[in-house]
Image (cartoon, coloured by chain):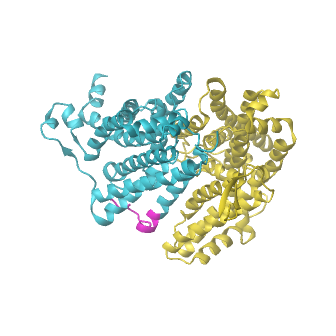
Chain colours: A cyan, B yellow
Amino acid sequence: MSAVFEQIFQVGFLAAIIRIATPLAFATLGEMFSERAGVLNLGIEGIMLLSAMTGFTATSLSGSLWLGILVAVLTGMLMGALHALFTVALGLSQHVCGIGVTLFSSGLAYFLYRLIFGQQSVPPSIKGFETLPIPVLSSIPVLGPAVFNQFALVYMAILAIPLAAFVLYRTPWGLSVRMVGENPRAADSAGVSVIGTRFQAVILGGALMGLAGAFLSMAQFNAFTFGVVSGRGWVAIALVVFGRWDPWRSAGAALLFAFVDALQLRMQASGLGHIPYEAFLMLPFIFTIVAMAVMSRNAVAPSALLKPFRREER
Amino acid sequence: MFRLEVRTSTPAWFNLALPLLAIAATLVLCSGLIALAGAGVIDAYGVMFTASLGDSYAITETMVRAAPMIFTGLAVAVAFRAKFWNIGAEGQLLAGAVASCFVGAIPMPGPLAMLLMAVAGAAAGAAVALVPATLRVKFRVDDVVSSLLLNSVIYYALMALIEGPWKDSFSGYPISPPIEDSANFPVLLEGTRLHLGVVVALLAAPLIWFLIVRTTLGFRIRVTGENPEAARYGGINVERVLLSTALLSGALAGLAGVGEVGGVHFQVMSDISPGYGYSGIVVAMLARLNPLGVVPAAIFLAAVMTGAEAMSRATGVPAFLSDVIQGTALLAMLVALLFTAYRIRRVGAAR
């Protein structure tokens, strides 16, 4: 048994956790910003997929990885703006619009990918990001190679967590976001533009979702496949709830999920497949549903979530 | 000068005009993608139409595809009428498919097997839908997120089954063993795939319409959705209505899975549903949550899906156009629905 544990818990395992957690951290932070402003964005699954496609395509055509990242982020922002247009400006129901955005973005991603690359027996790939060891830090035993010998996007995700917390809790804009998500009427009386702030938060969320998608097709798999996102957007929806709409907790939840996912991959590889791997993949969803029931007594969700704001209606 | 005004009532012709407007807008918007692919817009839509509705065989293929979306569309329409936000039709469909396949593999007389498959599938779908409804009623848990997340739980459960204990030992692929031949739904037209389940789906729509519009339960569902406070004041047990709605909605979604197993695939695989549960939301919204409207709305989406493959072969436009059309149609319909809430009124320039 100890040999098995040694095989599982090694540097490669820690590095794998970090890599799996990265796109989830971006996506979770993105969804969190949107929801803190009072807008549930179920478009996340499709937005990640479309961004993964546009980022991959831009890099594939231009040869520049960072141009691909830029295109993916812009794609995410554009789709975020579309969701905000429907739900914030027009006040349409957020969950149905979100499903609409996901259906539309996924369809568009499949369509454009097939149009640009045709049907090939071997899917085209790009030379994706390479690991970027950080001097000194990467030579720390165990932690060094696992955390500080990663893709640049991984470092960005690690920095994004405290940054998101700072922006949300310590800046005037973050205060506005929390106000329009908790009590838009009061925010409006205080002179905060509810519509404007919600638009900004959903678009920022879209940018982060775009990064999440780009990481998948440009660092993790170096190719775009139709299953490249495969439910990670829905995982992020769960992690935001599980992380109680807080950047630190949400990122922690992403790390926890990544640990479980990496563990199940290792157990499959080591032939310890007594427990079906799907049981592990189900866990975050089941935990979240249970957590929602337990948490419901002390309402932690943004009060105005799912509620459109119209000034004239009192 | 034009001004937006809040509407108090909507004329009846809106029910027909709005979906047609949304579909027209969708086709116009998506024609840009056809042009981008270098094909003629009229050509592409023409092939799409003839390949899905142009001859009797094409129509049967479209109807076979429409059947599951009629069921999921009804499931969503019923749920949304009560403002039970069931985004989980996909998972409920999968649960129905698994349960009916399990029953269909037991040797027994054909008609009995089909009946029990339907009962088992409907019960499984209902059981899944009961989870978010119970959580909402007992713990005030948001039903949008819980019903959505359950889709993933059910999907992985299905995968665990067909990759594990339930894997078909003959084929070696991750698919379930087939149901008994005698349990295959009878084909109604020689040489086509038009099966009994399609007729059941077509009959379900007026039945559900009757239930919603003419029965006490339907009345309770509508009042609960429109004004829960008034419903409670009027002596309606809102919690109970929500649970009944969930059972009905889940059962309908489960029946979508039953039809796919009994009439189309005869076994369960991971891609047994290409998102029919989510398409149900599109169908229900296009139908303005009217059960009778669900049928034409589902046939429209099915025709787009069936026609897209032929269009792709003939013109080279990727068949994924049908996915874009589906998403665009939903968003266009939501925008069109604004006309039910507001009217544009011409106001004199001088005040």
Foreground residue among A301 and A196: A196
Query: Where is the N terminus of chain B found, in terms of image quarters?
Result: bottom right
> Residue at image x 80%, y 44%?
B111
Residue A283 place in picture, x, y as percent: 48, 31
Name above or below for residue A102 compared with residue A288: below
Residue A174 place in picture, x, y as percent: 40, 37
Whether residue B107 is visible, yes or no, is: no
State left or right for residue A200 relative to residue B6. left
Foreground residue among A14 and A99: A99
State left or right for residue B21 relative to residue A283. right
Whether residue A155 is visible, yes or no, is: yes
Magenta range? A112-125
Name above or below for residue A261 compared with residue B286: above
Q: In which quarter of the image is residue B326?
A: bottom right
The question of residue A116 being in magenta is answered with yes
The question of residue A266 being in magenta is answered with no
Foreground residue among B204 and B242: B242
State left or right for residue B215 relative to residue B307. right
